[in-house]
Image: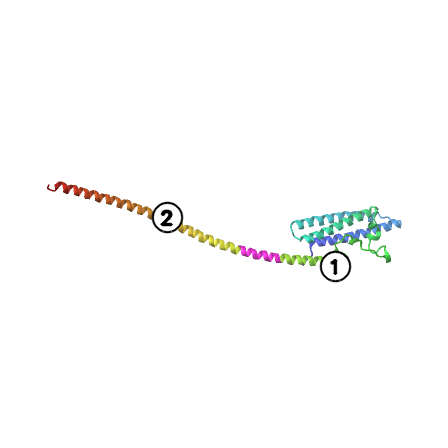
Amino acid sequence: MSQDPWLQNYDATCRLVQEIAENIHERNRQQKTGGNPAKINMTLRASLQKLKQNINQLRESLLRASSSRCIMQSEADRRQNLVDDLVTRDKQLNATFKGDVTHPELSRSTLMPGAGGEGGASANPWLVNEPEETRGLGFSAIKQQQQRIVEVQDAGLDALAAVISRQKLMGQDIGNELDGQNEIIDDLTHLVDKTDDRIRNETRRVKLVETKSASCGMLVVIVLLLIAIVVVAVWPS
């Protein structure tokens, strides 16, 4: 699996920090021995500007990844700590480059690993304010640790994707079932409408028959009355 681009940029930025520190040490050495540090000063200015750009790019890409939830919050916090460390180192390097070394941690003994201290060794200055889980680890070890973290996150995302996929299939099945139920309801509604129309037609027919029956009954009664009148009229008294 390829490494996270953000981690690759972070590793490159850390190497740039180490390179700048070494160049500052060499510049200081040339100044003490009467050499001409003009060329290395130009290189340092360009490198410090590049370092600032790299830090800004790391900060912006981290913000985008965190906002889009491409990484877990714990990993976003860890990377933010790494960016903050780079910002601190950038300030230290700029102060040392300008000769404004007012704090012990900005001196050469802490800026360059292996310089000063007992036995010519000192604590690694790049571990200042570093998270506990990466303290004392080299770049390769940190890279492996970060890769393992990314693999765990990928596995979690794969599991989440599988759950979402199953839920999607369940949703599709439910949707298909609802579509079938809606078709049945539509058929029932159509059948009820047709039955209602038939009932109304039959009701009108019954009323019509009743009306006709009533008319025929009245006619029969009238005829009988006429017959009775005639019979009474012609019956000898």
Within the image, what quadrant is residue 221 found in? top left
Percent x, y for residue 138?
A: 76, 58
Mark 2 near mark 1, Cβ–Cβ under 8 Å?
no
Disc 2: CA contacts within 10 A as few (<14), some (14-19) or many (>=20): few
Task: Give the magenta range.
Answer: 159-171
In the image, which disc is placed on residue 231?
Answer: none
Which residue sits at x=61%, y=56%? 160
Residue with the mark numbered 2: 197
In the image, which disc is placed on residue 141?
Answer: 1
Mark 2 or 1, nearer chain start = 1
Question: Which sits in the foreground, 167 or 3?
Answer: 167
Relative to 225, residue 154 above or below: below
Secondary structure of the residue carrying tag 1 is helix
Q: How is the image coloured?
A: rainbow
Is 137 colored magenta in this rendering?
no
Percent x, y for residue 109?
A: 84, 53
Q: For marks 2 and 1, give the CA distance.
A: 83 Å
Q: Quadrant of the C terminus?
A: top left
Percent x, y for residue 173?
A: 52, 56
